[in-house]
Amino acid sequence: MPEAPLALRPVLKFPDPRLRVVSKPIETLTEELRLLAQDMCEVMYDEPGVGLAAPQVGENVRLIVVDTQWNEEGASKSPLILVNPELSEHEGRIVWKEGCLSVPELEAEVERAERVLLLATDLEGAEVAIRAEGLQAVCFQHEVDHLNGVLLVDHISQLKRSRYTLRRKKQLRQEQEEDVAVGAAES
Ligand code: ZN
């Protein structure tokens, strides 16, 4: 059977425990890391999303990709690839309705800093400093959350979280049952 080189990495979904791991700092910039960054950009544009963190594709390293402009009319794709991102200088408050590729069918209004300074390096090891505001600032905070094992569900009330968790578990059970049924029909 021919290989499928174009298959995208699957995005892990809540409540996958791998999304809860605190990701490790990146010490060496390898070819493997470059390929991972490339894969992550492909997944982000395919889904589509405006950001993706490495743990969402099962790699617990501190790498994120962000592109908050590409889906605006006429804008081309120019992803920011950020190694070991850190946030400082949080200023102001902003409430944004957020979704997450790893937390299906949940939209939540989350309060974040309106402006942040992000420090990181690029894939060549050059230092990067970005002053972000609005959507980009929200996105940076969301993606850095992922590196710390924090998910969108942690930003909603406990009641909503319990309801959502139950709904997801039911959904996963149904998917499993369907898989079993398909498997039985094929054998
Ligand atoms: Zn997310």
Image (spheres, rainbow, N blue to C red):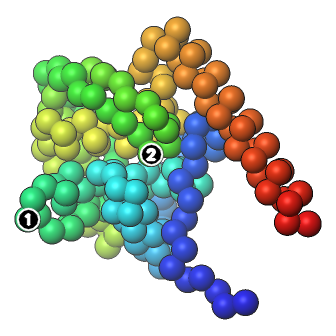
Q: Position of residue 132 (x, y in %)?
A: 14, 42
Task: Tell me: residue 152, above or below residue 126.
Answer: above
Q: Label 1: few (<14), some or many (≥20) within 10 Å?
A: few
Instruction: Choose the circle earlier in sequence order: 2 or 1.
Output: 1
Residue 30 in view of the camera: no
Cβ at disc 2 under 8 Å from ligand 1: yes
Determine which residue is flagged by label 1. Answer: 74
Q: Which quadrant does the N terminus fall into?
A: bottom right
Please state the total of marks drawn on the protein image.
2
- Near-viewer residue (135 or 33): 135
In the picture as drawn, the residue positioned furthest to the top comes out as 159
Q: Secondary structure at mark 2?
A: loop
* Pointers 2 and 1 in contact (C-beta within 8 Å): no
Q: Position of residue 159 (x, y in %)?
A: 52, 8
Q: Is residue 21 left or right of residue 105?
A: right
Q: Position of residue 125 (x, y in %)?
A: 32, 68
Q: Position of residue 47 (x, y in %)?
A: 40, 57
